[in-house]
């Protein structure tokens, strides 16, 4: 039997006992499985066996013969011995070159979902590498390579890039295949910050960025970019390809972290979190956004990337080199297998195509084999550009929704992001593709993970954020379309919208159609089952949000938008709740206060059968349709107060207005709106139900009918055998409403602009309803009988 191993810590009894335990006692037979368990336990506790250096080379060689560890523990033993300032780093590099292929093949099989049990051992190479301390020594080597200048620096420079690449590759492959490694690295904040400094080298940039992205994806606390040394210089020195890839990291660092807990999405929890945040100051995401915006030219470069045409992208040689880098980092290149497939397919039809080598094969210059290196399949160029734009548009979208929104808005308008995207709309963003369109491995053509589909959704989200309550929304039009808005206002004899007059014509879209018109065209052609319908409707609705503009509505009505929406709701009988909600919201904004829209509605919904289908869709989910109910209710109130023959004609003919005008209809809506929400379940999505119920009661108050409506609610409670239940709930909801809206200027402004009811009237109505005087005919408590009174419940209670 081999001699007992001498642990590095054998000066202590604990070290000897730990090693002996791995052998099952000094005189027992070796138990390698127990030894591995001892190693893992040592890593978790910091006691006993921790790394390969605690064993002799002879012992490891004997165990390797039995367990087939591919010589990894012995190589790590040598690597530990060489990992110090005065060692021969060339020797370290040679050892890493031996280890790297053992791990990369395993990682490649793992990430391409073709993992096979090709090894006899129970423990894969990456697991053994981590178990014997390989992750720690690789991290140590990276730190040594970037030590401050010293006498060894010249020697280090000769091998540092190659060694760094090997270390990064090894760390990444281990993270891919071995559970827990990424989280352990994420806990070392100094190391994560240090990794950013490795991105200064183009040779190690892609590997570093990929590793950082994976680490940040599991990191519990968001990293602060202002802690990265020389961040401004680092980012400013990136070329456009590097900046686009860096956006993958930024996507993690500038988005508020999601806890994954549904309770955190309630308004109650959000308000509590906001109060906590106020005491803590800006969040890490907000700090990171500010750090990026302080970098000179950052937003301008993003806009150039987002609007760059495929023909303007970087040359073939550099792209091929980057593909070779991605080739060894498969799972992070979302589209790599698609790129490979296209290249191979087109190689059959082209004499100057790319032929990728099999795994493990390489050339002296590190590039794939090509018959000529000056050409590249056009579809690969397009997909390459799509992947870049995905990340860039996401970052711009997040910045548009951040604290510096107005600053970002001004910059992206100045740098002509919108006209640039308009020029790319047909050829790239909404390009036509064949039935054999590019899809990722394991996905289908309609999957939301497809790069083509993801780009479209991200583009629509950006338009939504850009247009939402901002006068820059008119940059989505071209000069001719802006003139059309002016003509609509002139014909209707109403003042022209000030924002239209103030729009800088040099920054608007060019060409025959603006971006909004292009969007309407593809929206009307979208198949019924398309996942884009929701996002398209949201983007167009954001253009209409805010103070109601007759000219904006007519611009869209003239392009057949109302008929398209009604077709989707009624004739196609859409089943998707998300799409229905977005279409109802858009329809409400399109019709609000607009007599022509109600005429068009009545012309389309021209039979009782169609109207019943429409009502069925509305009543199937008031959470989805309540914004339309609110807009029709507000419009009805305005029309009833107008003395005009045309208005009277529409009031008498329109089925929808006649339906909403009935008190029983309003009471039915009111009862259900209050009944489907509670303080503990209020979210940004369903709080509109509370505001719609308030609109109904505010309009009743204007007509001195508020006591009547409250009395009818009381009767409905009793008829449902739940006296006090509804009104107590409504009382609690209104108390929360006061806390929520009286401290949020933006929300209160939105309520005022969208309803054309002053916010002071909103506040007065809520105060009247919450009046504690039981003698008040307009106070809720006057309609709750004493035995059922429950109005002072803490919001935190279930």
Image (cartoon, rainbow, N blue to C red):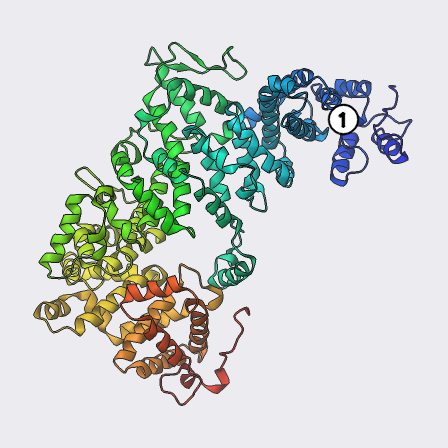
Instruction: Locate the C terminus by quadrant.
Output: bottom right
355 in relation to 443, above or below: above
The residue nearer to you, when weighing 590 against 565, is 590
The residue nearer to you, when weighing 712 against 433, is 433
Picture residue at 49% right of the left edge, 23% below the top: 325
Is 18 left, or right, of 200 in this rendering? right
Picture residue at 54% right of the left edge, 51% below the top: 259
> Around disc 1, counting alpha carbons within 10 Å, would you say few (fewer than 14), some (14 to 19), or many (20 or more)?
many
Picture residue at 90% right of the left edge, 34% below the top: 13
13 in relation to 162, above or below: below
Residue 45 at x, y = what percent? Answer: 77, 40
Is 212 left, or right, of 515 in this rendering? right
659 in relation to 510, above or below: below
Q: Is residue 518 visible?
A: no
Query: Which residue is the site of mark 1?
Result: 52
Is 113 left, or right, of 317 in this rendering? right
The answer to which quarter of the image holds residue 525 is top left
């Amino acid at each position: 039997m081999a001699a007992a191993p001498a642990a590095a810590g054998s000066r202590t009894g604990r070290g000897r006992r730990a090693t002996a335990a791995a052998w099952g006692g000094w005189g027992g037979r070796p138990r390698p499985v127990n030894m591995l368990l001892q190693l893992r336990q040592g890593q978790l506790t910091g006691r006993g066996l921790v790394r390969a250096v605690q064993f002799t080379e002879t012992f490891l060689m004997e165990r390797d013969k039995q367990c087939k560890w591919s010589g990894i523990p012995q190589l790590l033993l040598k690597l530990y011995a060489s990992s110090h300032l005065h060692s021969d780093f060339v020797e370290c590099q040679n050892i890493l070159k031996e280890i790297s292929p053992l791990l990369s093949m395993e990682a490649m099989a793992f990430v391409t979902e073709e993992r096979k049990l090709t090894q006899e051992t129970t423990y894969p190479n990456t697991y053994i590498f981590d178990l014997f301390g390989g992750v720690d020594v690789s991290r140590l080597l990276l730190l040594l390579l970037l030590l401050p200048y010293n006498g060894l620096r010249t020697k280090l420079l000769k091998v540092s890039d190659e060694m760094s690449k090997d270390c990064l590759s090894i760390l990444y492959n281990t993270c891919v295949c071995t559970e827990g490694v990424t989280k352990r690295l994420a806990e070392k904040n100094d190391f994560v910050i240090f990794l950013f400094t490795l991105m200064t080298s183009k040779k190690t940039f892609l590997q570093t960025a990929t590793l950082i992205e994976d680490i940040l994806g599991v990191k519990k606390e968001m990293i602060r970019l202002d802690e990265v040394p020389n961040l401004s210089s680092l980012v400013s020195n990136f070329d456009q390809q590097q900046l686009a890839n860096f956006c993958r990291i930024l996507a993690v660092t500038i988005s508020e972290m999601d806890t994954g807990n549904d309770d955190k999405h309630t308004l109650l929890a959000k308000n509590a979190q906001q109060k906590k945040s106020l005491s803590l100051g800006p969040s890490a995401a907000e700090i990171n956004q500010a750090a990026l915006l302080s970098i000179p030219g950052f937003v301008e470069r993003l806009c150039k990337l987002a609007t760059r045409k495929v023909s303007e992208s970087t040359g073939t040689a550099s792209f091929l080199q980057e593909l070779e880098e991605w080739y060894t980092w498969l799972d992070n290149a979302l589209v790599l297998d698609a790129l490979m497939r296209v290249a191979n397919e087109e190689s059959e039809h082209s004499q100057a195509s790319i032929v990728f080598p099999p795994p493990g094969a390489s050339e002296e210059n590190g590039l794939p084999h090509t018959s000529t290196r000056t050409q590249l399949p056009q579809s690969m160029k397009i997909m390459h550009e799509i992947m870049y734009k995905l990340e860039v548009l996401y970052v711009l979208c997040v910045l548009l929704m951040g604290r510096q929104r107005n600053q970002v808005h001004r910059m992206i308008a100045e740098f002509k992001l919108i006209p640039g995207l308009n020029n790319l709309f047909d050829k790239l963003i909404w390009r036509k593709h064949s039935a054999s369109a590019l899809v990722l491995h394991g996905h289908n053509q309609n999957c939301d993970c497809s790069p083509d589909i993801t780009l479209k959704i991200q583009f629509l989200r950006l338009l939504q954020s850009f247009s939402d309550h901002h006068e820059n929304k008119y940059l989505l039009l071209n000069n001719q379309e802006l003139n059309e808005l002016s003509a609509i206002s002139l014909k209707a004899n109403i003042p022209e919208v000030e924002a239209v007059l103030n729009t800088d014509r040099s920054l608007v879209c060019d060409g025959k159609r603006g971006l909004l018109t292009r969007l309407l065209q593809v929206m009307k052609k979208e198949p019924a089952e398309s996942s884009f319908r929701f996002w398209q409707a949201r983007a167009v609705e954001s253009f209409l949000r805010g103070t109601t503009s007759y000219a904006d509505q007519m611009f869209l009505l003239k392009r057949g938008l109302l008929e398209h929406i009604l077709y989707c709701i009624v004739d196609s009988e859409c089943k998707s709740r998300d799409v229905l909600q977005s279409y109802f919201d858009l329809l409400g904004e399109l019709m609000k206060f607009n007599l022509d829209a109600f005429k068009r509605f009545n012309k389309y919904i021209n039979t009782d059968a169609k109207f019943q289908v429409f009502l069925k869709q509305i009543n199937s989910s008031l959470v989805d349709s309540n914004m339309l109910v609110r807009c029709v209710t507000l419009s009805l109130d305005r029309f009833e107060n107008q003395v005009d023959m045309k208005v009277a004609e529409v009031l008498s003919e329109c089925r929808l207005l006649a339906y909403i005008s009935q008190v029983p209809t309003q009471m039915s809506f009111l009862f259900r709106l209050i009944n489907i929400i509670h303080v503990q379940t209020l979210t940004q999505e369903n709080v509109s139900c509370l505001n719609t119920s308030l609109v109904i009661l505010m309009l009743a108050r204007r007509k001195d009918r508020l006591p009547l409506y409250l009395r009818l609610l009381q009767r409905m409670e009793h008829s449902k055998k739940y006296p006090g239940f509804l009104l107590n709930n409504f009382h609690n909801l209104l108390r929360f409403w006061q806390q929520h809206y009286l401290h949020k200027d933006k929300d209160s402004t939105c309520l005022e602009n969208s309803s054309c009811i002053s916010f002071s009237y909103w506040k007065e109505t809520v105060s009247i309803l919450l009046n504690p005087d039981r003698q008040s005919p307009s106070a809720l408590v006057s309609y709750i009988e004493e035995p059922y009174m429950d109005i002072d419940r803490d919001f935190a209670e279930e």
